[in-house]
Structures are given as structure tokens and as C-alpha cells.
Image (cartoon, helix red, strand yellow):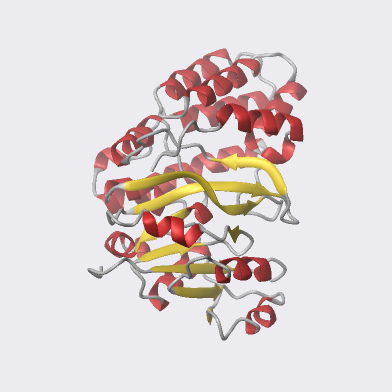
Amino acid sequence: MSAARPTLAVIIPNFNYGRFLPRTLDSVLAQTEPFDEIVVVDDGSTDNSMEVLAGYADRARILRITNSGHLGACRAGLAASTSDYIYSLDADDFAEPGLAARVRAALVGRPAKVQFRLNGVDVAGHPSNSSFPTFPANYNAAAMRQDNTTAGFYICPPTSGNVFSRDVLTRMDLSRFDPRGYLDGSPTLAIPYFGEVVSINEPLSNYRMHQNSASAWSKPTVELLERELVLFHKSWDEVARVVGERLLAAPPKSMYVWERRLMIASLKGRIMVAHLAVRFALCLLRTHLPPRQKIIFVFWSAALIVPSTELRRYLIRMKRSALNRPRGMQAVLNFVLRARRPAT
């Protein structure tokens, strides 16, 4: 890594998101402090993506690769760039104008990663009154490692809320992960074992919530939840291999696991789920999630004890996605969960 001020690149992996690309690219070109590099990796799109990208060829480096998956496209972008830090912006999301400037200010200590909040927007890009996640004050890598053990993950935004150290990604060797996976999956889980993480409690980018999104889980099924448990264990197997600690095998009694088991049982219509709700709540209380968020989740898990299967399904959808929440309710949640001061 260079001794001078760290350089910052944005890499945009794209697959069939031609309709979103103009706003995404315009947002990175309109920064108050420009990115040092802009690289777009088209992952074998079959829509009009390449035609759209042709209009930006003089302002960004455009790569086209055979379809390789999200992480595969990110690896191609990493290889095509030279900057010290990499911001991976999903092709359907778009940045706030001050993102690059705000992130650069956080790179002074050369952290392994910088993460920040995201504004939720609908498919048209309109605000959805959702901003997430909320980071506790002084949330450092040690606390994140503890959350990994207790919760099965640490408080972290999706891909578009993360800026990664090239040095750390190189040492981690992304070729050791499934290229069909995601940069905000196993590689991000491993980051706190490689260095410090800076959390910015400000929304610096916009996350488009729609049914085509890879995280479109707004109407979960038993099959989807069971598949998530399989992927969870696979992710932790990858992390354990990369970090080199056998103790990092997927936490079998983590909050993530108990939550999925609770939701699966609820969707199946089982009446006796109180023990699962209790186990989920006990793990939850040991995490670094904000106290107000813990209270909300405890009440949510307790509500799943009700005998009505339909009500349980509604409660699960409400928790899983802001798409299922009335705008008034989302506004109240944002007010309750809003951090009292930035954590940087």
C-alpha cells in the first residue's frame, strides 16, 4: 500500500442491470471529491447493459467478462484496478455525492474496511424511509469478532456500504471463496480477523430494494430459510479456511441459527416455539446490537408464540424487509433506532 494518501477506486459489478446503470454511474461521477478509478465489470449481461456502458467509456474503465458470479466480477475489477481501497457498488444502487470525501477521511489509519449506513430506496429510486444498519459507538473489530461468535455475523451493511483494503483482500485471496458467492458474504465476515474496521453512522449510499435484488427475501418460505442455513454453514467453512482458525466453524448456537429455526417452525404452523424464541432472545441480548433494537427484536420473537400461523407469517415478513412495513411504521422504527451520535 502506498505511503501517500490512500487512493480509492469504485468497482461496479453488473449483470443485466442496464436500466439502473445510468443513475449508478452518474452518482459516482458526481462526487464532490472524485474517485481515483472507476471500473465497471459487466458479468456477461444479456440486456442492454453494454449499450448503456458505451456512453461512459470515456469516463470509466469498462470490462466485459464471461458470467462468473458476483464475487468473480469483483475479483476481475480488483485485478483491473490499482487503488489502495476498493468500494464495490452494486449496479442497482447509487452513491451520495459526499461518499468518496467522507470515506477518505476515515482511511487515515489504514483500516481493513470502512463501512457506513445505507438509505433504502424503492425500485424507482424513491426514499423508503429506511436507513440501516445502526452501528453502536466504538464498534471495533474485537466487538465484531465477538458478534460473529454470538450472532453468527457482525453488524454490517450489504455490499454497497463497504470499502475494502486492497492489501487485506489480497492477503485473504478471494480465489479461495466461491466466485458465485458475494463480496458481502464470507470475505466480509472474515475482515475483522485481518485488521480494524471503521463504522460511519451516516448513510453515504442508496440501496435499491426490489424483488430482483439478490437479497430479496421479503416473502420467505421454509425452503428459502433452510437454504439460508446451508449457505450460512458454507460461508463459515470458507471463513475458517481463510482465517486459519478451526474454532471459526459456523457457530451452531448463534442467534442467526436460532432465528432461522424459529421462523421455520412458525411458518410450518408449529405451536410449541417458545423455547426457540427464548434461545434467540438469549443470544440476541449478548450481541452489540443497539439496546432499542434488542427490545424490538425480543418483542418480535415473543409475538411469534401466538397460535395464528397467518399472523406469524405477517410478523416474519415485517422483520425481513422494509418493503412489507407501512411507511408510518417504518418512520417510527427509524426514529427509535436512530443513533445518538456518529460512530467513527
In the depicted view, which residue is nearer to us: 126 or 166?
126
Q: Position of residue 133 (x, y in %)?
A: 52, 40
In the depicted view, which residue is nearer to us: 255 or 5?
5
Q: Is residue 17 visible to us here? A: no
Residue 178 placement, left or right of 308: left
In the depicted view, which residue is nearer to us: 341 or 166?
341
Q: Is residue 137 above or below residue 168?
A: above
Q: Position of residue 261 (x, y in %)?
A: 55, 28
Residue 279 placement, left or right of 126: left
Residue 165 placement, left or right of 32: left
In the depicted view, which residue is nearer to us: 116 or 213?
116
Q: Position of residue 229 (x, y in %)?
A: 51, 39
- The residue drawn where x is 32% and y is 63% is 173
- The residue drawn where x is 62% and y is 70% is 26
Q: Position of residue 195 (x, y in %)?
A: 27, 50
How many marks the image carries: the answer is 0
Q: Is residue 119 visible to us here? A: yes
Q: Quadrant of the C terminus?
A: top left
Q: Is residue 295 above or below residue 198?
A: above
- The residue drawn where x is 58% and y is 22% is 296
Work out which residue is located at the far front of the displayed protein and give it.
32
Q: Quadrant of the N terminus?
A: bottom left
Q: Is residue 120 above or below residue 288?
A: below
